[in-house]
Image (spheres, grey):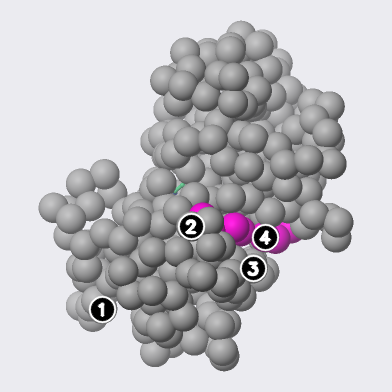
Amino acid sequence: MSATAYPFAKGHGTENDFVILPDADGSTHASLTDDRVRALTDRRAGIGGDGILRVVRTDATDDPAAVAARGAATWFMDYRNADGSVAEMCGNGIRVFARWLVDHEGVAADAPVPVATRAGVLEVTVDADGRISAEVGAPALTAASSVAVDGRSWPTTGVDMGNPHAVAFVDDLADAGDLLAEPAYDHDVYPRGVNIEFVVRRGERHVAMRVHERGSGETRSCGTGAAAVMVAAALADGAVPADGSAPAEPVVYRVDVPGGELDLTWTPAGTVVLTGPAEIVAEGSATL
Ligand SMILES: N[C@@H](CCC[C@H](N)C(=O)O)C(=O)O
């Protein structure tokens, strides 16, 4: 562990919370070990968070996703789950990341901000009402499967949003139990692990969900998870083409999460846009 102090911030989007590590020139966290990620995200001995957002310029890291994005994006979101694992994308994280860029890195808020991620370059926009909208990419339907909790199982819709999701419709969100343990899933279908969403209907184009995130456990919100849920619900409702291709007109759903509410729009361009609040709540220095 390092004894040299380095800056950090804390932020969240609908209570999906992150430790932000500013590292513009890539010199402070060039080797961000799993141990340091776990120490920083620890809710008792550390700062606490569902994940880490390392803020680094694309020309200051040799991560292949950042290298590929040079020329298209200045900033790379180096995302880590709380257990230290690397994830392709984080929908709430990229919105908090953009909040940080606009508030602290001099990035203009009057135009979409391209952000490099391991799922490609995605645009983030600060809306007039202060919420932040992020492209979370085009969904890809994956194999149908099932998940189980405490001996009960449910069929799942597989949706890849850059990262893998399995969406289960349940009668009651309490059916998922305490979600302290990872639900059982088919490891042959999801060899890289999977984020698992449990969904109930609340009204027309309105659903509510809980999520067990790969690498973080149950969280209060998951932006890519909300997108996957919206895709599964829109397909089940016949609101979009059955093959999962883009709708002719924008299709909008509200997705309630334990930490708030998110709006999801599946656009005719094929991408899903995630809209909600994103805040920076603390800044300081750490030695973890
Ligand atoms: N909370 C995030 C997703 C973070 C990554 C996920 N746990 C994974 O491993 O794929 C979101 O808001 O999308």
Structural distance between the alpha carbons of marks 2 and 4: 16 Å
Magenta region: which residues?
271-277
- Residues tagged 2 and 1 counted as in contact (Cβ below 8 A): no
**Which residue is label 2 attached to?**
270
**Which residue is label 1 attached to?**
154
**Which residue is label 3 attached to?**
263
Q: Inspect the image, locate mark 2, and give the three-letter code of the amino acid beneath it.
A: Gly
Structural distance between the alpha carbons of marks 2 and 1: 28 Å
Viewer-proximal residue, 181 or 247? 247
- Residues tagged 4 and 3 counted as in contact (Cβ below 8 A): yes
- Residue 165 shows in the view: no
Whether the residue carrying mark 4 lies under 8 Å from ligand 1 is answered with no
Q: Inspect the image, locate mark 1, and give the three-letter code of the amino acid beneath it.
A: Trp
Whether the residue carrying mark 1 lies under 8 Å from ligand 1 is answered with no
Whether the residue carrying mark 2 lies under 8 Å from ligand 1 is answered with no
Please report whichever mark, 2 or 4, sits nearer to the chain's N-terminal start. Answer: 2
Q: Inspect the image, locate mark 4, and give the three-letter code of the amino acid beneath it.
A: Thr
Structural distance between the alpha carbons of marks 1 and 3: 25 Å
Q: Secondary structure at mark 1?
A: strand
Please report whichever mark, 4 or 3, sits nearer to the chain's N-terminal start. Answer: 3
